Amino acid sequence: MDRELKSKTMLVNCQSEPKSKNGFRKMYLAAVAALSFAIAAGMVCGYSASATANMKRKSSPVRPSLEETAWIGSIMALGAVLGGIVASWLCNKLGRKGTLMISSIPFLIGWVFIAYADKLVYIYIGRFITGSCVGIVCVTTPPYLIEISTPDVRGLLGSSFQLFVVGGVLIVNGLGATLSWEWLAIPSSAFVIFAMLAMLFVPESPRWLIGKGGYQEAVSAVKFLQGDYVDASAECVGIDEDLRNQPKGSISLKELLKPDALIPALLAFGLVFFQQTTGSNAILFYTVDIFSAAGSKNANMSTIIIDAVLVIATAISSGLMDKAGRKTLLIISGVGMAVSLFALGTYDQISESNPAIKTDYNWVPLASLVIYITAFSFGFGPIPWLMMAEMTPLRTRSVICGAATALCWTFVFIITKTFQALEVSIHDYGAYFVYAGFSVLSVIFTIFFLPETKGKQGEEIQQLFLNYCNRKKSSEKYDEMS
């Protein structure tokens, strides 16, 4: 039976599908399974904050210098760049579920290198390998969440990726308060095993299945995910028609330069640029050191508080995503980060000449970073991952998301590797003022360049970019005629 006949058969069958919306939507279970890998990725990202501080103890088999500490924090990002590039190919070949499952193997290998490291080079290798898995997870999980969800909850599930990442950061830093850096790798690897087992029981993305000719598997997947909430056969017919309208074969450069691919790609690149240049990962990677330098009495506890705020604020943001809209939250996020970083920079600059400030106002660093993390979590934390997946066409999604993820982790490497150098050259306050400046620029970028995607189908979003291009061409023709 050829493709056309299968589509017609499903179209006929859809008339007998139940129209009730009372079934339990296992979509949420599938989302939690995929998001377990986001927690595993967050544990990799947050590991260096408490682990590098613990490596300073006398009994540690590895005691890195300041420069080596910077490499422990940043080399993970280099691995993520590679992972982001490889993931776009894996997603198309193995599917979203298959890619996440296969990533668990190098995940475990990387944590074993770290757990049993007696030389610095083994920590570097482990961080690079686990970092590459983080890149794979960042490319694979958001599209999976978008493709298994319906428009009414797409913002909630899509933005949950960042929520579960920061949940992983909180878990690993909470454990890091009591575990040595060697033992901290053990629960981190155990969670990877949990994520892999959870993913065994959920289906592949229906869109990917239909794209590979698995129509019956796709219908079964939709029934599993949505229960009676949607007409599974009709849903698959719609997906099939959408896919048949898209070009076939390998993706060419000409396709990537079309407005509905190029414009969202550039916007995705802009989002990840500001996500990192506003200093988020520099602060998260070196939170313990930042509080220690600022004169906080209990740097580890302050770090845990910041991580808890990160989780709570991201959870609130996920609930607001489909109500307030993406642009509103991004603007609030940029303004909040700019104000808090400027306050922290001012405090640090004044305390340089007046050390008594650190005694009398030692609450300022914690308060400033709580506001910063809250603002980041409301917008530039979760939204770039959501919008890069929902703005891009399915055909070019893996390529664009892979490129954006690779670019994102390139920025992570640059920011985390240069943070300590910035502290030395322009002082701590100088680094905070630089990040505050980028926060202001992020607000300008959001207001003048980003479209609002709340509540829109993928086809509607892509039409926005095509309409923009057509309006521009019409305007140019009008100018020529006049």
Image (cartoon, rainbow, N blue to C red):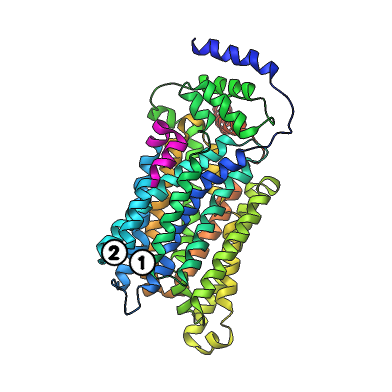
Q: Residues within 10 Å of mark 1 (few under 14, many from 20)?
A: many
Q: Residue at x 30, y 69 (%)?
A: 67
Q: Can residue 337 be seen here?
A: no
Q: Earlier in the sequence, mark 1 or mark 2?
A: 2
Amino acid type, callout 1 = Glu
Amino acid type, callout 2 = Ala
Label 1, label 2: how far apart the Cα atoms are: 8 Å
In the rendered view, tell whether residue 184 sits above or below residue 154: below
Q: Position of residue 452 (x, y in %)?
A: 63, 42
Check disc 1 and report the residue beneath it: 182
Q: Is the residue under label 2 in contact with that under label 1 (CB below 8 Å)?
A: yes
Magenta includes 95? yes
Q: Residues within 10 Å of mark 2 (few under 14, many from 20)?
A: some
Q: Position of residue 406 (x, y in %)?
A: 39, 46
In the rendered view, tell whether residue 345 sits above or below residue 206: below
Side (left or right) of 354 relative to 82: right
Q: Residue at x 37, y 57 (%)?
A: 413
Magenta span: chief secondary structure: helix
In the image, 31 versus 353, the foreground residue is 31
* Residue range (magenta): 89-104
In the image, 211 versus 456, the foreground residue is 211
In the image, 186 versus 77, the foreground residue is 186
Q: Position of residue 74 (x, y in %)?
A: 36, 60
Q: Callout 1: helix, strand or loop?
A: helix
Magenta includes 304? no
Quadrant in which residue 399 is drawn: top left
Which quadrant of the figure contains the C terminus? top right
Check disc 2 and report the residue beneath it: 117
